[in-house]
Image: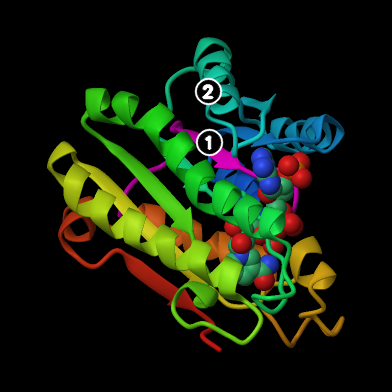
Amino acid sequence: MENIAGKKALVTGGARGLGKATAIALAKEGVHVAITGRREEQLKLTVKELQDLGVTATYAVFDISDLTSVQQGIEQLNHSFGKFDIVINNAGIASFGSLLDMDADMWTSIIQTNVLGSYYVTKAILPQLIEKNEGDIIFVSSTAGLNGAATTSAYSASKFAVIGMADSLMREVRKHNIRVCTLMPSTIASDMSKELGLTDGNPESVLQPEDFAELIIANLKLPRRAMLKSASLWSTNPS
Ligand SMILES: NC(=O)c1ccc[n+]([C@@H]2O[C@H](COP(=O)([O-])OP(=O)(O)OC[C@H]3O[C@@H](n4cnc5c(N)ncnc54)[C@H](OP(=O)(O)O)[C@@H]3O)[C@@H](O)[C@H]2O)c1
């Protein structure tokens, strides 16, 4: 098993939902964590929780759908926090509706955030992982990235794309000892699933963010050699 204590991780969208649970789980393993998002207040509160767990923690405010903003944010974190070992591409948005009903701007925004956002963050950090000849990049797709549904054209298009990007990247960078993995959870209790009306308030009916975080940690601890050469896709709680 890999020892992850002392490593440095970036968790995008780390102030709430799956990202926050992942950041906390990483900190409990002794991983130093930087989190990002657009809302500074939430980021500050989560950083305090992470610091209370005894690790170094910090945040950067930036919009992942904007390349310049991502480059500046990562540069700022490299300066204040250091170079990264682990990247969790978690931040994302969702909105459901028929193809005809959904506003073209919303469609674009989902692709811009979920696909290009993950690409921008990965592009900004990949050179430092290659330089270290080691690293882990985890993408958060969805079961909506495996199968479409009647109202998920934009979201599914974005999450299918994430799987394609990650699978290609896995093949591209394994020679640099960099593992790339994609998780494809079904519904998990969070603000997003609540806003989409996917949860019924019964905590037993869906996964909790902490369950998802456990999978991320388990994945990071898997033997490196086997993971470099095997399939990079993990689906949880398929619907
Ligand atoms: N919950 C589910 O049922 C479920 C199932 C499958 C996959 N997923 C995926 O899991 C990931 C996390 O979902 P969640 O349920 O935790 O969602 P959430 O509660 O809505 O949290 C999303 C996070 O992403 C950040 N974010 C969104 N747009 C951003 C942008 N343009 N720039 C920077 N940060 C941005 C948000 O921070 P700010 O608002 O501060 O920017 C927030 O911290 C997403 O990729 C989602 O698609 C979720």
Residue 14: in magenta span: yes
Evaluate whether residue 18 shows in this view. no
Q: Label for residue 74?
A: 2
Q: Is residue 118 above or below residue 63?
A: below
Residue 162, by quadrant, is bottom left
- Main SS class of the magenta portion in the image: loop
- What's the magenta region? 1-18
Which sits earlier in the primary sequence, circle 1 or circle 2? 1
User: Pointer 1: what residue?
Assistant: 10
Whether tag 1 and tag 2 are in contact, CB under 8 A, the answer is: yes
Q: How is the structure coloured here? A: rainbow
- Helix, strand or loop for disc 1: strand
Question: Where ligand 1 lies, by image quadrant?
Answer: bottom right
What residue lies at 19% left-to-right and 54% top-to-bottom?
Answer: 228
For badge 1, the amino acid type reads Leu
User: Going by the image, does 21 lie left or right of 90?
Assistant: right
Mark 2 Cα shell of 10 Å, populated few (<14), some (14-19), many (≥20): many
Residue 156 in picture, x, y percent from top left? 53, 71
Screen quadrant of the N terminus: bottom left
Residue at the location (56% across, 17% down)? 72
Left or right of 208 on screen, residue 65: left
**Label disc, if present, on residue 222 of the rendered structure:** none
Against 103, residue 20 (above or below) is: above
Nearer mark to the viewer, of 1 and 2:
2
**Drawn side of residue 216 relative to residue 130, left or right:** right
Question: Where does the image place residue 194, in percent across and percent down from the top left?
Answer: 82, 71
